[in-house]
Amino acid sequence: MHLSDGYTTLQKIAENDEYATYDLFFGPNHPGMHGNFGYVLDMVGPEIVKVRTNAGMLHRGFEKSMEKKAWAANLSLIPRVCVVDPDPNEVAYCQAVETLLGVEVPRRARYLRSITLEMSRLTSLLMGMGALGGSLGHYTPMYLMMLDRDWLLDLFEALTGARVYHIYNVPGGVRRDLPLGWLDSLLKLVDTLEERLLTWDRLLFENRVVHSRLSGLGYISAEDAVASGIVGPSLRATGVVADVRVDAPYAAYDEVEVKVACSGGGDALARAVQVRMDYHESLRIIRRLAAQIPDGPVRLNMGNLMKLRVPAGDAYSKVESSKGEFGYYVVSDGGLTPYRVAVRGPSLPAGMYLCHKHLPGMKIDDVAAWMMSFSVCPPDIDR
């Protein structure tokens, strides 16, 4: 027996005198699903009793595709590993290549990398906070936060010529210096975004409905978070002080203060509050970077990057994205293309592992909120 409303298909898989068990595909066509990903849920009434993951809806094969492309050509591919926060992929990959080349990026380029990384973090956190509100039925903050995100994308477009996939970082530095007046525009926007945090607090973080829906949802202890490989805001929300920008500084993060705040609590509400705290700190970091940015070149002269040969060897580079540690392991055999590339994304532990522990016992309307609280990004699972 199948019941279809045009969006979901229910298949009755068992029935007794009191209950019917349905098999529900909570997949890409569902407005609460993040990206082309799916969970197959066994349900008794509205309650989930079993979950099966259904990745593979993307079939992109990022890692294998990189082995067929020139070193620099991969920069047009890797931002798609996490669409909403693409720049950390660029920087992690470039840093691994630069380690193999044995080159040091100019100091101004390191500052520009840090500034654009924090901007990318802001765009992702805005989408995340807005989507979390949307998953609970609060669409007003979602629409307003998308407007704020669009202002940041305007600045990305002025700097790189692109709004979503910026391809700003290259081995040896960044593609170009700042346009005249660009940094002043960024600082004015930072002031505006900080003022609007009061609005977000009223609409979302101080909202009684949000608190009641998220309190206790998807609780994870600090010990379980570490054992499961949870990183980023979700790890800090359990009380663990961990941030790659501080623990293993890269770009210009060793020259500015980065305060690592932890909300504690371990549930979906704590993760939401942690994202808000991370957002506020990113605004402060941009101000510190802008105040200290030095003059000088923004990239090394490495000739035609499309003919770049990278010495044989292997290197691992990691950065702190809006969702946690993004790592790239790169192997070179001395040729014009990578021999191997492996990506360590932050979404797999929750999206593919913790779902089996957390979702059974939840109601169907909690699934989207649970996924958003962990910032699950399906492309970095199915890569």
Image: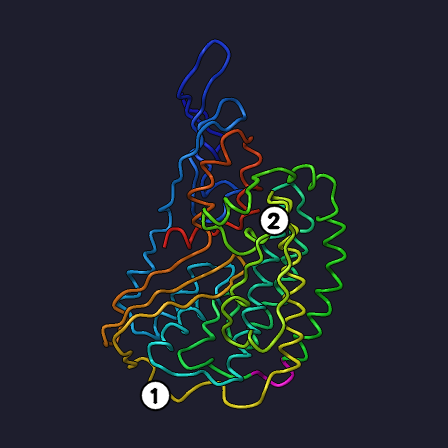
Q: Residues within 10 Å of mark 2 (few under 14, many from 20)?
A: many
Residue 181 shown in magenta = yes
75 w.r.t. 173: above or below: above
Q: Which of 228/84 is in front?
A: 228
**Element assignment for label 2:** helix
Q: Amino acid at mark 2?
A: Arg
171 to the left or right of 144: left
Q: Residue furthest front?
A: 223
Q: Which of 88/99 is in front?
A: 99
Residue 279 shown in magenta = no
Q: Residue at x 43, y 47 (%)?
A: 36
The residue at which mark 2 appears reads as 271
| Residue range highlighted in magenta | 178-182
198 w.r.t. 3: above or below: below
**Element assignment for label 1:** loop
Q: Position of residue 265 (x, y in %)?
A: 63, 45
CA distance separating discs 2 and 1: 45 Å
Q: Which of 84/47 is in front?
A: 47
The residue at which mark 1 appears reads as 303
Majority secondary structure of the magenta segment?
A: loop
98 to the left or right of 136: left
Q: Amino acid at mark 1?
A: Gly
Q: Residue at x 76, y 57 (%)?
A: 198
Q: Position of residue 160 (x, y in %)?
A: 51, 76
